Image (cartoon, grey):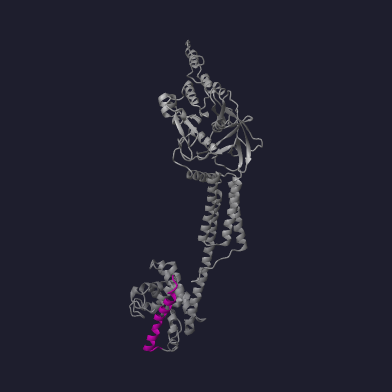
Amino acid sequence: MESPPKIELSRRIRTIWAGTILMITLIIALAASSENGFLQSLDHFFYDRYMRMGASSALRSNDENQITIVDIDEPSLAAVGQWPWPRYRLARLIRLIHQSEPRAMALDILFPEPDQTSLQNIIQRLETDLNVHLPVTDMPRGMENNDIFFGSVLAETPMVGARFFHFNHTGKGGVCKQTTVEITDPDNLLSLHQATGALCNTPAIETRLKNTGFINSQYDLDGLLRRIPLLIRYGSQIFPHLSLALFLEAQGISTTRVIQTRTGPCIAAGTCQIPVTREGYAAIRFTRPGFSFSYLSAVDILNRQFEKSDLRDRIVLVGSSAMGLNDIHQTVLDPHFPGVEISAVVVDNILKNNLIILPAWAGVLKGVACMLTGLFMGGLFYRFIGPGMLFSASLAWAAGLTGASLIAYREASVFISPAAPIVTVLILFSLISLCRFAMEKRAAFTWYRQLSSAQQLTMEAMVSMVETRDPETGEHIVRTQHYARAIAEHLRDTGFFKEILTEKFIKNLFLSVPLHDIGKVGTPDRILLKPGRLTQEEFEIMKLHAKHGRTIITRAAKDHQGSNFLALGSQIAGTHHEKWNGKGYPSGLAGTQIPLAGRIMAIADVYDALISERCYKPPFSHDKAMAIILEEKGNSFDPVIVDAFCQIEDKILEIARAFQDTEEYPA
């Protein structure tokens, strides 16, 4: 069977589709370059998958990194006392760490309020609240105020303290130490957040610290911590994050500046270049879940149950992983990541030049990738390739984009999300597939109409062939078509043969009726055109036309699956001369053995033969023909169909008049 024709796109349609593809591509490209919320969530999806692919579940050994965390953990709180500890105890902890000669130290804890356990504060509270004066003697100098004592210990160490910046209010008053690290941005490459206030340590502590760093974090909309601000502007000065301040202290660097590189701004710190975004953020590379660094419990330090080599020449962070202190963060690899270890990861990333680079031009590149994707998908549309090739090409393009992004991440620590161009591929693939479906459906419908027309022409040619042999047929074919359809519709409407008389069956019945006498092409002219009655021998030859008709149509339909009207035509041609009582021909079928189409055709054919003029008889009147039909009810014809035929008598008469052979219908 011939394939459906391909429909070529007109220039106007091509222009409309090209404009649609271009418009969608531009929208996605603009959304990609402007950090659209939906695309940003997809960016996070790829960012997280890449990070998990490069993660390891193994813990670090002490030789793998230079960082140790002194943890005020649950056992420390249980053994030494609940938080907050008296600051003389913290002073002892810091002094013991310092005596082990670490390279640098940072305290990831903020002390904005005076220590209420200081003896000086206790005496003052008793006097104020109870009017009780408590004399104190033999108190070592400096021990009456825990904050002063703690500050004096901090002054002996290279400790980096913590602070927190506010952006919606000025915060509490007090003295905030200016950073001793000079961070400059001579080319104005950064657009940092401007803090409006700061939460600092109590003055007795703040003024004795060598340096400080802020401990602000930045969560994404899904609640995960993927990046932190490394720099914040407060007043006229640029302040570092605690992790950056600790790194600079460990390296002995006091002056840094922001420079421009091929991927965007970087903090030049000695030989290190620390990549940041224009807003001063650093993207953290997590390689392991929490507690993967070297940890020492604070209670072990206080009890001197550690080796000095555990801390010597190492970068030490003092903080807490205790759940009750609520310094826990949700990260890509661990929903319970200790806050102190966040700073440790950042320092480790800087030391190993392992921070993720978020290029300043990533948005432009994603927009360009979207435009190239649009051109590629547009090319596939214009080529009008098959659905399998379209899917394969689209999948290969999406895989290539993802592969290039993954290689950049693994080899150069550069993250450029493929989300936007992949979304472009998916949307345009769906759009092109929908267009192809609509066009192919239209092509199939056109082909179906052409095929139906060809079948109709074939049938008409076959019927015309019969008419050339039997010129007296006239409008017999048209009338019997309408009789048969009218009978079938009435039977259906009155509840008979509902499972058979579907809309499709009735349509095919109408189309196949003209084939009922096609077998007459095999009947000799001397018999077919004989003006008088046939002899018995001649009648036996005439009866063969039913068998010939069934054979002809069956052979024609053999190689055409789904030609339902031909299958029905074969039934009609072979059974419309069978009789209800079994005395018909060619097979002697009786009752319901005769197909419904044959039983309907039998009445239509006989009625029209009766009212029509033939070479062997004059036309009968309608009333006489109806009387003969009724007389043969239960003999030649199915009684149910005879009843239906009589019930639509007016319609039958109307059809006979509408398609009569002569101008005057016989009386």
Residue 526 is one of the magenta-drawn residues: no
83 sits to left or right of 26: left
Where does residue 67 sit, x and y in percent of width and height? Answer: 50, 33
Please determine whether, in this image, residue 336 is positioned above or below residue 144. Answer: below
For the stretch drawn in magenta, what is the main secondary structure?
Answer: helix
Q: Quadrant of residue 376?
A: bottom right
Residue 558 is one of the magenta-drawn residues: yes
Where does residue 97 sit, x and y in percent of width and height? Answer: 48, 26
Q: Residue at x 54, y 56 (%)?
A: 431
The answer to which of 318 and 394 lies nearer the viewer is: 318
Identify the residue at the far front of this view: 309
The answer to which of 415 and 169 lies nearer the viewer is: 415
Using the rendered image of the protein, determine whether residue 196 is visible from the camera's viewpoint.
yes
Please determine whether, in this image, residue 75 is positioned above or below residue 392. Answer: above
Using the rendered image of the protein, determine whether residue 430 is visible from the camera's viewpoint.
no
Q: How many marks?
A: 0
Identify the residue at the far right of this view: 187
512 sits to left or right of 19: left
50 sits to left or right of 263: left
Please determine whether, in this image, residue 423 is positioned above or below residue 99. Answer: below
Q: Quadrant of residue 414?
A: top right
Where does residue 203 sit, x and y in percent of width and height? Answer: 56, 22
Where does residue 564 sit, x and y in percent of width and height? Answer: 43, 71
Q: Which residues are magenta?
A: 533-561
The answer to which of 126 and 67 lies nearer the viewer is: 67
The answer to which of 577 and 621 lies nearer the viewer is: 577
Please determine whether, in this image, residue 41 is positioned above or below residue 78. Answer: below
